[in-house]
């Protein structure tokens, strides 16, 4: 399985397959959305798409890892894909993510609330 996003902002050229950005109306996002990574991974596996045309190493073997470089590091996805009656078929895309603590605190609850 691919490694989750890395905080290393200096990913080497060979450690990624594509550099991409998520842009909202106000700015470039500092990370990369999982949904966007899944869509790019699917597009990378389908011959003839714009994404597949940009790759040095095509995802054509039925299973592969696709690594997207973004401002905060790299997000990697694992794809299982193939063709069914000549049509591209995505069987699964898997992405692992790390979580960071976004809150730490205390909650004060009145004794009457906790009583049965």
Image (spheres, rainbow, N blue to C red):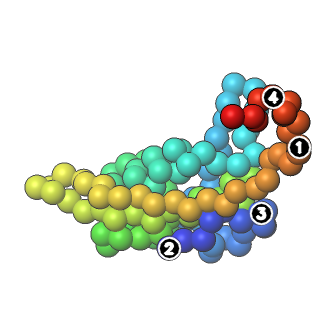
In space, the residues marked 4 and 3 are separated at their CA atoms by 45 Å
User: Residue visible at 19% across and 52% down?
Assistant: 87
Q: CA distance from mark 4 to mark 1?
A: 18 Å
Residue under numbered circle 1: 106
**Nearer-N-terminus badge (2/4):** 2
- Which of the two marks, 1 or 3, is nearer to us in this view? 1
Q: Which residue is mark 4?
A: 112
Q: Is residue 60 left or right of residue 12?
A: left
Whichever of callouts 4 and 3 sits on the residue coming sooner in the sequence is: 3
For marks 1 and 2 on the same chain, the one whose residue lies earlier in the sequence:
2
Q: Earlier in the sequence, mark 1 or mark 3?
A: 3
User: Disc 4, disc 3: CB below 8 Å?
Assistant: no
SS of the residue under disc 4: helix
Q: Is residue 73 above or below residue 23?
A: below
Q: Which mark is residue 7?
A: 3
Q: Is mark 4 in CB contact (under 8 Å) with mark 1? A: no
Dot 2 falls on a residue whose secondary structure is: loop
């Amino acid at each position: 399985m691919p490694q989750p996003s890395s905080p290393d902002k200096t990913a080497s050229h060979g450690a990624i397959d594509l550099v991409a950005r998520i842009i909202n109306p106000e700015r470039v996002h500092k990370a990369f959305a999982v949904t966007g990574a899944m869509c790019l991974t699917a597009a990378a596996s389908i011959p003839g798409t714009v994404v597949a045309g940009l790759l040095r190493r095509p995802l054509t073997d039925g299973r592969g890892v696709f690594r997207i470089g973004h401002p905060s590091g790299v997000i990697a996805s694992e794809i299982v894909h193939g063709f069914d009656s000549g049509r591209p078929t995505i069987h699964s895309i898997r992405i692992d993510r790390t979580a960071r603590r976004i809150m730490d605190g205390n909650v004060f609850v009145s004794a009457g609330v906790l009583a049965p």
